[in-house]
Image (cartoon, grey):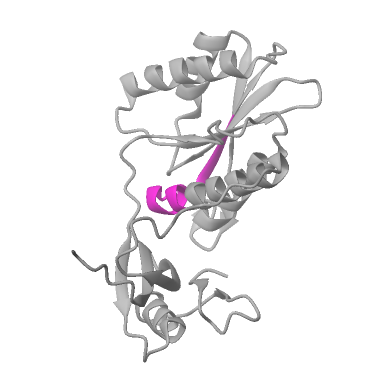
Amino acid sequence: MNCVDMTPQQVVTIRDYGDKFVEASWGWSMKGSKNPGARGKSKNREINIERCNKRAKARMRRICMAGGFDHLVSLTYRENIVDKERAWKHFEKFVRRVHRYIPDWQYVVTTEQQERGAYHFHLGVKGYQDVDLLRSLWRSVVGDGNIDVNYIKTKRGYQWKRNKLAQYLAKYIDKDMNTELNEKRFRASPGIVIPKRKILVPARFSARDYVLYKIECLAGKVGFVWDPEGTSNSYGWACSWG
């Protein structure tokens, strides 16, 4: 009979997105556990939706960081499109047409429902956008619609900081009250690779201190640390951005 080693161990996860954008987490895991990351379900629907939204926002942040997205594009309708499924079909058709002209065009996108009930889209994209081309392609799909590109002036020019753009897009995940429990909160281009490196830290060392050390090495500074009170630093998260 084989014995399973259930020795607890400290696991550090580091995501280095380049350009001094780094995030890392730490926590304890049971060696040999078949499903150490199992998520419990609540009987309360609102609690479960909140958990799904939280996971979706974290995933969206990582995609924004990994994709280098630094510009915001909004796609709107003049027609009052209140059918979300129909709106997504329009978006998919739009993306196919964009890829005919820009094969490597990547995005992360979420929806917003206006007060009148109409849906429109907010996208994170990378770099300069050919607004005239995108507008003509969007209108070729939906008729009378519009596209806006939102630029934020920074020290590096007119662009968003990746983490700020992710934060902006994530707010629409919480705003959508019609999202079903198992429904996708956002969509993104396939093939965006999120960096991930796991490191085991011996129990005699502080995983928290190791995380802060690695972020300083990779990014030059630690911008934020989250380690809940009363947990004795047994788990937490930190990043290089403020």
Q: Residue placed at 58% from the left, 44% from the top?
A: 52
* Near-viewer residue (152 or 65): 65
Q: Quadrant of residue 86?
A: top right
Q: Residue furthest front?
A: 1
Q: Which residues are magenta?
A: 62-74
Could you say where residue 216 lies in the image, as x and y percent from the top left?
41, 81
| Direction right: furthest residue | 115
Q: Residue at x 73, y 33 (%)?
A: 177
Against 108, is 28 above or below?
Answer: below
* Location of residue 7 by image quarter: bottom left
Front position in the image: 228 or 176: 228
Q: Residue at x 62, y 16 (%)?
A: 145
Q: Is residue 74 visible?
A: yes
Q: 180 and 30: which one is in front?
A: 30
Image vertical order of residue 216 relative to residue 68, above or below: below
* Residue 242 drawn at (x, y percent): 58, 70
* Residue 72 placement: quadrant: top right
- The answer to whether 51 is drawn above or below residue 23 in the figure is above
Left or right position of 58 against 196: right
Of residues 4 and 143, the one nearer the viewer is 4
Where residue 163 appears, as percent x and y from the top left, is: 53, 57
Would you say 14 lies left or right of 225 here? left
Q: Position of residue 229 (x, y in %)?
A: 65, 79
Examine the rendering and report whether any part of residue 70 can be seen.
no
- Side (left or right) of 124 relative to 10: right
